[in-house]
Image (tube, grey):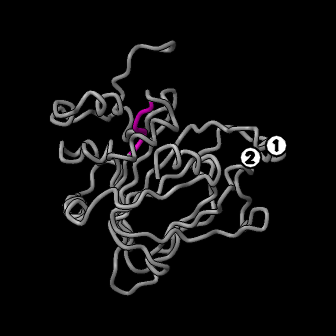
Amino acid sequence: MSTAAHLAALHEQGFTLLPGVLDATGVASLRALMDRLQPIHWDYQGLVDDHFKCVFNRGPEWLPYLDLPGVIELAEAALGEDCHLIGMTAWQSRPGFIGGDLHVDHLAMELPENLLADPAFCLPMQICSAHLYLDAIDADLCPTLVIPGSHRSGRKPLPGETHWRGRTAEAVLCKAGDVLMFRSELWHAGSRNRTVDRTRHLLQVHYGRRMVAQKFSPYLDFRFNPDVVAACTPRQRRLLGDHAAAEYD
């Protein structure tokens, strides 16, 4: 699929799958990086899952995942050529991981569903997330669940809600190296790891429009790694926040 076709899917379905973004060698390299991570700041290590935040700042070896071919072109088409990174999290989910309920990541404002149902109305995107899977995702290895078209609901799901317009959540099954891109208004959820011996390795890359704040914890104490900044390409510097001056700067 072309970037234009993936962009159309984001508008129509709220998500799109980009196959083969990383090959087997790339998957192995990223998994090795992830396996070496140690917690700092607001990172979380639990009994069945680990979250490592702002991993782009760990070293220059993480920079290629800011602007993977095919992914960055789609992010820029969806959010503007001046979009930037708002977060990057490495996430490992081991056997016993539970997942979560249907939710949206960000809803800029509630809108009437009848307005959003009009095919002539195009709802602009503010934030998109790229999920880069480093394992083959089957029904047992905590696939991401999505309700197609639910970004047009104009609201968040209610507690315990499992349907929208008669549609239930569908599991996104994919191969290692595939990327699921979805917009922040899409109703989605994590699901259980029902395996006995497999861990899901996932890199989340979150992109926002220029005016969406970057989420670099621990915020006031965050400092860019000078080795990372020195190794950036011009596009990567922009993604990290090196923008041209604008109205509020």
Stretch of the chain drawn in magenta: 83-87
Please name the amino acid that badge 1 sits on.
Pro
The residue labelled by disc 2 is 154
Please name the amino acid that badge 2 sits on.
Gly
Which tag, 2 or 1, sits closer to the chain's start? 1
Q: Quadrant of the C terminus?
A: top left
Q: How many other residues sit within 10 Å of disc 1, few (<14), some (14-19) or many (≥20)?
A: few
State the mark number for residue 127.
none
Q: Residue furthest bottom?
A: 196
The residue labelled by disc 1 is 112
Q: How many other residues sit within 10 Å of disc 2, few (<14), some (14-19) or many (≥20)?
A: many
The percent coordinates of residue 152 (x first, y second) are 72, 49
* Residue 100 left/right relative to 199: right
Quadrant of the rendered image containing residue 100: bottom right
The percent coordinates of residue 128 (x first, y second) are 51, 45
Evaluate whether residue 47 shows in this view.
Answer: no
Q: Residue furthest right?
A: 114
The percent coordinates of residue 43 (x first, y second) are 34, 54
Above or below, 1 against 83 in this view is below
* Viewer-proximal residue among 106 and 236: 236
* Viewer-proximal residue among 120 and 175: 120
* Residue 32 left/right relative to 52: left
Q: Is residue 68 magenta?
A: no
The percent coordinates of residue 154 (x first, y second) are 74, 46
Q: Secondary structure at mark 2?
A: loop
Q: CB atoms at circles 2 and 1 under 8 Å apart?
A: yes
* Residue 130 left/right relative to 33: right
Above or below, 18 against 224 in this view is below
The residue shown at (57%, 67%) is 145
The residue shown at (46%, 83%) is 194
* Viewer-proximal residue among 25 and 193: 25
